[in-house]
Each structure stands twice: as C-alpha cells, then as structure tokens.
Image (spheres, rainbow, N blue to C red):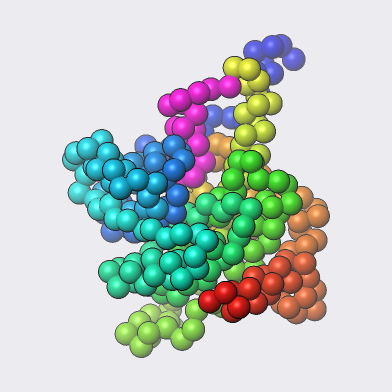
Amino acid sequence: MSFLSMLFASPPAPVFTSSCLIDLSSKIYIITDTSLPSNISLARTLYNLHATIYIGLSSYDTIDILKASCPNSKGHLKPFVYDPSDLASVKSAVDNFLENEWRLDVLFVNCSNEFLPCFVLVKLLMPILQTSASHFCHPNSSIRVIWISEEDSAQASCDQLYFLAQEFSRRKQCPKLNDSYAHTLPNSNPSGVQHVLVDQRRQGADLRRSFGRFLPFGAQRTEYDVCTLLYAGLAPRVASGDWVIPWGRKGEVSEFVRACTARQNDETNGVAAALFEHYEERTRVSM
C-alpha cells in the first residue's frame, strides 16, 4: 500500500453532515458540556437550523458568541448549568428544564470516568424523553440519548458506559405517563428512546493511525468531530446498541462487551445489569 493510501485509508470522510439536515425549529436538544470545541460547533450547527438548545456553559459569554455567529437563526439558546460533583444541582437543572419545556428530542451527555452525574441526569430526563417518543404514532427512532465517552477514557470506562446505555434502553424508567398524554398510548411509537454510544476514545486513535504527524487541526478536525455527533444524534437508522465511531459510522461491538450485556435469566443478572444496579443504589444514597 502506498504512503498516500495508508494516509487516507481510515477513517473515511463523513457522509452525514449538516447539509443533510433541514429546519429544526420544532426540536429541543440538551448539550451538557460546551467546554469542548466539537460541542460548541454542534450547538452552533443546531442553532443555525433554528433549534432550541440547552447548553452546559463553560462561560456565560458562550450564548452571546453563538448568537452573534448565527444572526439569522430563529432558534433559542438557554443555559443548562449544574455541578457534576453536586447531584442536587443536577436535579435543579432538570427541574428548571421541565418547568419550561414539554419535549426533549436528543440529550448529548458527555461522560468522564465518573458516571454517577450522567446516570442521575439521564434517569431524571427519561420521563420527558419517553413522553416525547410516545407522541409518534409510527416507529420513529429520533428520540435519543447520546452517551459521549471522553477521548482520554480508558477502554474499561468506555465499555462500562456502553453497559449503562444498554441497560437504560432495556428498562422502563418512566412511570405512568401524564394523563394528558394517555390518548397517545394505544398507537404510540414502539421504538421508544434510543441510547447510543459515541466512542471519542477510538476517534483519537483512528486519527493518529490515519494521519500520524499530519493530524488535522483546527476547523477541519472540529468539523469532523461534529459530523460524528450529528450522525449519532440525528441520522436515520441509528438505534440502541450502536457504537458510533468517526466520522459517523457504526463500529463493531467486541465479543466481551456483547457477553457482558447479554441477558442471563432475567434483567437483574449479568455484568451490565449489576453495574446499573450499583449506580441505582448509589443514586438512592446520594440523593
């Protein structure tokens, strides 16, 4: 294989980009961490298409900067601020969101090696996600939780994040829906809420393998990162169980991970189920 062939062999260029999207004015998104350039660009892309986005702020100037960069947007940018070390603040952020919104289309949640804040956040938002999914009277997989691993995460952490995503997709987290939506239930969307992993750890490895010292920097790298997130969050035919890798593809799930997430007798058995129960117990103690 020639040098140029090796250089550009993997990963392939993104296929699902912002040009694949249309008006998002009816959609509501949460992006939990805008300290990362890719997440800032994701917020800008969605806002430019007139969506409503709640963003975790590294600085309150972020909203003003995003608005200035998209002067023609009819969307909305709102703060979604909490302290990951304070679970009570997670609940406060969710309560504020629920007071102002009636639906949630996609939750983009960045997960460090401490998963408890992410677990609590997803658990608290599952009712509105499931209610949003129930509004469709046909199969529709657009309501999603995107579990984003950090690029410097260990393999074990990435695997465990996938375990939690799989368990959330299998369990009924939502109590009886509000009576005002009861009429939607007989024909409600069977797809429910999708839980999808984005492996940014593999993203960094693929970049280093593909480009070596010619690793792309700046705008191109950020643009490709955004395409990975857009694919996971908004592309069709993405569903629970998918392990998304650069720049918007479905990666292979290892046999070890498949074995750990397999059902054994009932949903309370197995490695993934045990991890889920562990966080359930920690949530009860912490909250």
Please count the marks in the image. 0
Residue 60 position in % (x across, y down) = 30, 48
In front here: 73 or 161?
161
**In this rendering, position of residue 163 left or right of residue 21:** right
Q: Main secondary structure of the magenta part?
A: helix
Q: Is residue 237 above or below residue 97?
A: above
Query: Which residue: 58% across, 22% down?
Result: 215
Residue 190 position in % (x across, y down) = 51, 72
Q: Is residue 98 above or below residue 142?
A: below
Q: Residue 174 in magenta?
A: no
Residue 73 position in % (x across, y down) = 22, 44
Query: Which residue: 63% across, 73% down?
Result: 282
**In this rendering, position of residue 117 left or right of residue 94:** right
Query: Which residue: 71% across, 68% down?
Result: 275
Query: Which residue: 50% across, 36% down?
Result: 225
In front here: 158 or 21?
158
Q: In this view, does 147 lie above or below 280?
A: above
Q: Which stretch is magenta?
A: 215-230
Residue 270 position in % (x across, y down) = 78, 70
In front here: 83 or 138?
83
Residue 42 falls in image quadrant: top left
**In this rendering, position of residue 104 left or right of residue 244:** left
Residue 199 falls in image quadrant: top right
Query: Is residue 263 among the parts visible in the rendering?
Result: no
Query: Is residue 228 among the parts visible in the rendering?
Result: yes
Q: Residue furthest front?
A: 86
| Placement of the N terminus among the 4 image quadrants | top right
**In this rendering, position of residue 75 left or right of residue 169:** left
